[in-house]
Amino acid sequence: MTQPPNNPQGDPGQNWQGQQPQGGHPQQGGYPPQGYQQQPPPKKKFGCMKIGLIVLGVLILLAIIMVAVSGGDDEGPTVSSGDESSQESTDGGDGDSGVTFQGKTDEDTAANAGDTITKDGVATTSTPLSVETNPIGDTLLCTTITINNESDEQVSFNTLDWNLQNPNGASTMATFGGSGPDLSSGQLAPGGQTSGDVCFEGDPSAMPGEYVVLNDGYISFSSARLAWINIL
């Protein structure tokens, strides 16, 4: 009877007939056993990137739609003069009554002092500038501002939203010290009205010419300004 040979230094996994046990690994040559299939390399995962691009595209599309809808609802500015006549802008965007001033841009709306400019449902009137003197003797130019909120949204107002451009083209901020109640600041509800004085430092006797009352605050966040022209 044949006995399996002793193999004290051999591979304990190798049987006495020199064959690899089932499921064993090759010992020489580095070749995989018959029937072994090499796994394909893992595919790169682009799922997260695709989802991110889709979300970004949806957000951009929504932003475009919102801008288009809001732009379609905006009304062109109108200028109403003292004789109650009204002229609406005809340039397709922000316009004016044909009045111009130094430094005026295509987006500005200009009117004569005392006229009413209505934009985005808010009607604003600036009376002609009057010369006043504050308690310390400085010469001031003051106008009475009246705001009627004819829109369906609350609007804010502030004295500091107003500037005065002198005949040299330099603008100065509003100051306090006039004889009448100041415009101050606050929120104006739909259908509400507020009125008050806005004053500026200036002396038309020393610098006669064109003075422009400017507002760029409560109407919108664009660069469009409202302007009232005074010749002093």
Image (cartoon, rainbow, N blue to C red):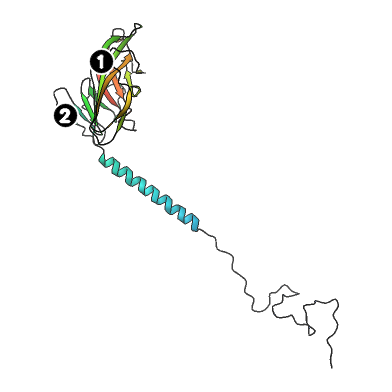
Of all residues, the one furthest to the top in this rendering is 137
Secondary structure found at label 1: loop
Closer to the chain start, of discs 1 and 2, is 2
Instruction: Point out residue 109 in the picture as x, y percentages from the top left corner.
Output: 26, 28
Give, as a three-letter code, the residue at label 1.
Leu
Q: Is residue 178 above or below residue 105?
A: above
Q: Residues within 10 Å of mark 1 (few under 14, many from 20)?
A: many
Instruction: Point out residue 214 in the picture as x, y percentages from the top left corner.
Output: 30, 23
Residue at screen point 28% across, 17% down: 181
Residue at screen point 49% across, 56% down: 48
Instruction: Point out residue 55 in the picture as x, y percentages from the top left corner.
Output: 42, 52
Work out which quarter of the rendered image holds the N terminus and state it. bottom right
Of all residues, the one furthest to the bottom in this rendering is 1
Q: CA distance from mark 1 to mark 2?
A: 22 Å
Q: Is residue 217 above or below residue 181?
A: below
Q: Is residue 151 above or below residue 15?
A: above
Quadrant of residue 93 within the rendered picture? top left
Disc number for residue 86 = 2
Give, as a three-letter code, the residue at label 2.
Ser
Circle 1 residue? 129
Instruction: Point out residue 103 in the picture as x, y percentages from the top left corner.
Output: 32, 23
Q: Is residue 111 visible?
A: yes
Secondary structure found at label 2: strand
Tell whether 223 sits left or right of 149.
Answer: right
Give the camera-side residue of 4 and 191. Answer: 191
Give the camera-side residue of 115 and 96. Answer: 115
Q: Is residue 20 above or below residue 133?
A: below
